[in-house]
Amino acid sequence: MSVFKRSYKRYTGPISNERFRLGVLMRYGAADLWSSRITNVVFVLCMIPSLISMTVIYIMNNDAVRLLLSSQGSSTPKIAMDERFFFVMLQGQCWPALILIAWIGPKLIAGDLSNDALPIILSHPISRVEYVVAKLLVLLGFLSAVTWIPTSMLFVFQSYLSKTPWAAEHIHIFIGMFIGSMLWIILLSLIALSVASWVKWRIVATGLLFATMFVPAGVGTVFNAVMRTKWGNLINIPDMMETLWIRLLQVNMPGYFMRNALPTTALLISLAAMCALCASALNARIRAREVVRG
């Protein structure tokens, strides 16, 4: 706007509290992600396991439906609504969340870096910590919508349909699914943001995110085979998370599995070290400066 026109005016609208200004980043970040049709498609696909689980729960708790299906010649095996069922259901929700965050994670922060917008954003009364927290909260909202929220709703649905008092005896399943989902969400969010902060190209960042999850798992498996040990699983993220989910939900597993599994303390320390490494990478990259070469 040219100065000589004298048509500019001072902003006279309401000024938000400095404590809640990170909400601006959250609002625009979430709106930008939802504007993509691919995000909507992937989000809907992530909800398919919940719909399948809901159907199974309804059939297993409704004798009339099971009798109707059996009369039509289709067999309906009895599926116990126990820890193992909800463990499989939790897996069915958490692993598709990896696809979702592989799509939305790089888009959330890479644009600010590739367009040199980060120095402008941090020139406002928003600190680096608030910037990262705002991005993490956006990812937490998306991932919560496809992990612990639908699994909790299915837990409530099973409790409602059950003919016997079921919720009180299986409350550990609800607690385990929530804690396990939150561990998965925090780890995925930090990995996605740290990868996106160092790689500006979205396609490369998405591929690198998958590589970060599965390449160390292969290396750990090879290490176990060569050294005849089990400690290589400390970098095997899929194995670590499934072991933690099994223990949180108190799933009865064969004895050989429990003997070969790593201690819970070691798994939590390894996850904490991964999160700290991602936080260190974010701290090194998220800076309110711009390097000018000339």
Image (cartoon, helix red, strand yellow):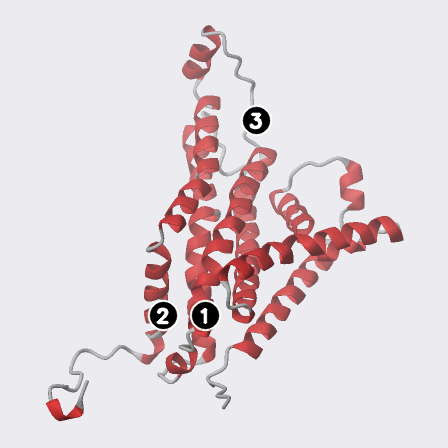
Q: Amino acid at mark 1?
A: Val
To which residue does mark 1 refer? 133
- Tell me, yes or no, if residue 292 can be seen here: yes
Instruction: Assess whether mark 1 and mark 2 are in contact (beta carbons under 8 angstroms).
Output: no
To which residue does mark 3 refer? 80
Residue placed farthest to the right in the image?
227
Q: CA distance from mark 2 to mark 1?
A: 10 Å
Callout 3 crowding tier (Cα within 10 Å): few <14, some 14–19, many ≥20? few
Whether 270 is drawn above or below 96: the answer is below
Q: CA distance from mark 3 to mark 1?
A: 40 Å
Percent across and percent down for residue 226 are 87, 51
Look at the numbered disc 1 and give the secondary structure of its residue: helix
Residue placed farthest to the bottom in the image?
4
Q: CA distance from mark 2 to mark 3?
A: 45 Å
Whether 180 is drawn above or below 50: the answer is below
The residue located at (53%, 13%) in the rendering is 75
Whether 3 is drawn above or below 129: the answer is below
Q: Earlier in the sequence, mark 2 or mark 1?
A: 2
The residue located at (35%, 77%) in the rendering is 19
Q: Earlier in the sequence, mark 2 or mark 3?
A: 2
Disc number placed over residue 25 in the picture, else none: 2
